[in-house]
Image (tube, helix red, strand yellow):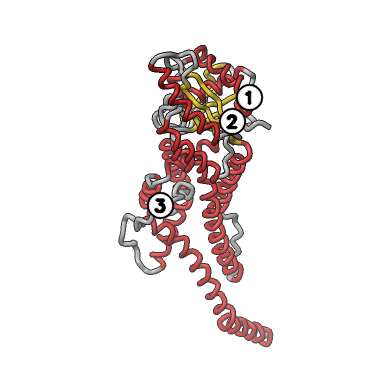
Amino acid sequence: MTLWRGLVSAWKRVEAGHDAVFVARWRQGVRREARRQQDTLRALVLLESLGVDNPVAYETLDLIPYLVADVHEWHQRMGRETFGDAGVCC
Amino acid sequence: MSPVIRFFGGKGGVGKTTLAAAFALRQAERGTRTLVVSTDPAHSLGDVLLASLADTPREVLPGLWAAEISGEEQASRRVAEVAEDARHAVPREVLPAVERHLARAASSPGTVESALLDRLTDLTEQVGTRWDLLVVDSAPTGHMVRLLSLPTLLTPWIEGLARQRERARNADRLVAGMSGDAADDPDPLLRRLHVRRDRMERMARRLRAEALVHLVVVPEHLALAETLRAADTLADAGLPLGAVLVNRVVPDEETGVLAGRRDQQQEVLLRLKERFADAGLVRVPLLAGTLAGAAELAVLGTVFDGAGGTLAG
């Protein structure tokens, strides 16, 4: 039994080590790519707040709630409870 | 097949509403279920048909439906829809910001035209089922042309946006898969973007394949240059040009002041005939007064019947 438990805990350590060394690093890269993609979208909605006209504003109305929610999540992730400009977010 | 979407465009005051209504009425009389729509912010279709009209089409005569649509109204309807959907989709604390952004987007340049096209798309999607023919008494020339080339401008934009979003989601899903919580729910936003893009593409395709633009012009030197320009712009946008209607042509038997007028008109008519040899030219005689109501509009029916080509129906 102790041998079994020892084996299990050893495997778990190996798995954690593998995770830390390989998976985590890769995951970070993928996450960064995901954020970069989302940043582009975020920029689109923020540009309008800065006065850059969006010629297809009507066609992209559907995007607005999602993008504002996204900006919200983003500033919270950055450790700020409020965005600072009530015109853009909260 | 004869084109099932007809636009009547031209400068303000040349009589396009009257001609569009008369054409629609003639088609309805022949048994074609026809919807005539006014997009001009200063609506006069109701006055011509002697009926009070609204955004929703109503049958004003047997087989003839009519509506006056507005870009502003359509835009505020859609903003309300998006805001309502947002209430269920995003955190409550961001809702005020969402409403501010929506209001700003709704007031940005181009929105009214986009909204108008959106409403026209709604109606066009029912051509073939509810109606056989859609006649649009379109707003003045420049505005109309911009309106018609919108789908071509918008499609690549929405496509790019959908692609961005898809890529971001694929990366997200990969991360989620690795950490064990595979989220495979369909993206509601992406679905909506696709639906809108498909709709626009369908509309653009139909406009190119099933629409015809009839320019309405009065035979005067001032109007000539603009008509020729409008025709070029339409051709550039890939929209087929139908017969050109020349309104208020002084009849041969007139004398006095009107005879002088006629000589001037002949010059312009000659130039128009040269330019629109392929599309065809239909002359509408100058009448004593303006026409209103079914009985008076029917007078113009004979003009269309004698026209041949794209207007004879």
Q: Position of residue B106 (x, y in %)?
A: 40, 45
Q: Chain of mark 2?
A: B
Q: Chain of mark 1?
A: B
Q: Are marks 1 and 2 on the same chain?
A: yes
Q: Amino acid at mark 3?
A: Arg
Q: Position of residue B226 (x, y in %)?
A: 44, 37
Q: Chain of mark 3?
A: B
**Mark 2 — residue?**
B280
**Residue name at image x 58 percent, y 21 percent:** B304
First in residue order: circle 1 vs circle 2: 2
Above-or-below relation of B164 to B246? below
Disc 1 is placed on an element classified as: loop
Q: Are marks 3 and 1 on the same chain?
A: yes
Q: Are marks 2 and 3 on the same chain?
A: yes
Front residue of B162/B214: it is: B214
What is the quadrant of the N terminus of chain B in the image? Answer: top right
Given this view, does label 2 or label 3 mark the residue nearer the observer? Answer: 2
**Which mark is drawn over residue B92?**
3
Visible in this render: residue A45?
yes
Q: Position of residue B211 (x, y in %)?
A: 59, 36
**Which mark is drawn over residue B308?**
1
First in residue order: circle 3 vs circle 1: 3
Q: Quadrant of residue B259?
A: top left
Q: Quadrant of residue A72?
A: bottom left
Given this view, does label 3 or label 1 mark the residue nearer the observer? Answer: 1
